[in-house]
Image (spheres, grey):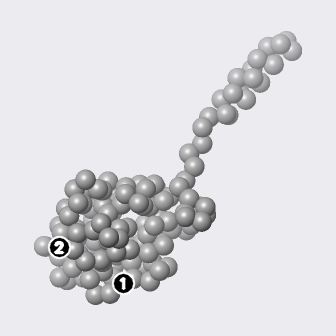
Amino acid sequence: MTARFAWILLVFLLAGCGEKKNLPTGPDGSPPDPNATFTRVLGEVFVPSCARSGCHAGQAPQAGLNLEPAGAYANVVNRPSTQRPELLRVAPFDPESSYLVKKIRGDPDIVGSPMPAEGSISAEARQLVVDWVRRGAPRD
């Protein structure tokens, strides 16, 4: 009976030793902000800074990217960029390969101008987007 219990215990211990996925850390080694949600990105970045007439809203949004609430998530996550098709607009867990992040930071490898077109967003807003992507760009 004791040997059988030991085997059962061993099986459970080994089952608990599975590999855990570590979220990408920032340049300073910090984990992404757990409060960086799509709801916040939508409400604090996309709607006030991007989803406006003549930009990323309406029937003919710039670069074919509509960021209005109804379709924003489906339009950005795991979708290729129209300006750099080899890059996804948002590559979950990988802000350095996410074209949207590159555009809001104004990285040198973007096509055209940094976004938003009418000036930059705050450092906090950029970090919110980066942290959301680092968390895997979950839809909450």
Q: Give the quarter of the figure containing the C terminus.
A: bottom left
Q: Give neighbour class at mark 2: few <14, some 14-19, many 20+ (Cα, 10 Å).
A: some
Residue at 47 percent of width and 64 percent of height: 132
Q: Is residue 16 above or below residue 51?
A: above
Q: Quadrant of residue 119?
A: bottom left
Residue 118 percent location from the top left of the image: 28, 87
Q: Is residue 55 visible?
A: yes
Which residue carries the number 1 mark? 120
Horizontal side, residue 107 vs residue 16: left or right: left
Q: Nearer the viewer, residue 68 or 109?
A: 109
Horizontal placement of 7 versus 67: left or right? Answer: right
**Disc 2 to disc 1, C-alpha distance:** 19 Å
| Mark nearer the N terminus (2 vs 1) | 2
Amino acid carrying mark 1 in the image: Ser
Instruction: State which mark lies toward you, 2 or 1.
Output: 1
Q: Which residue is mark 2?
A: 61
Seen in the picture, residue 119 relative to 28 is either above or below; the reply is: below
Q: Residue furthest front?
A: 108
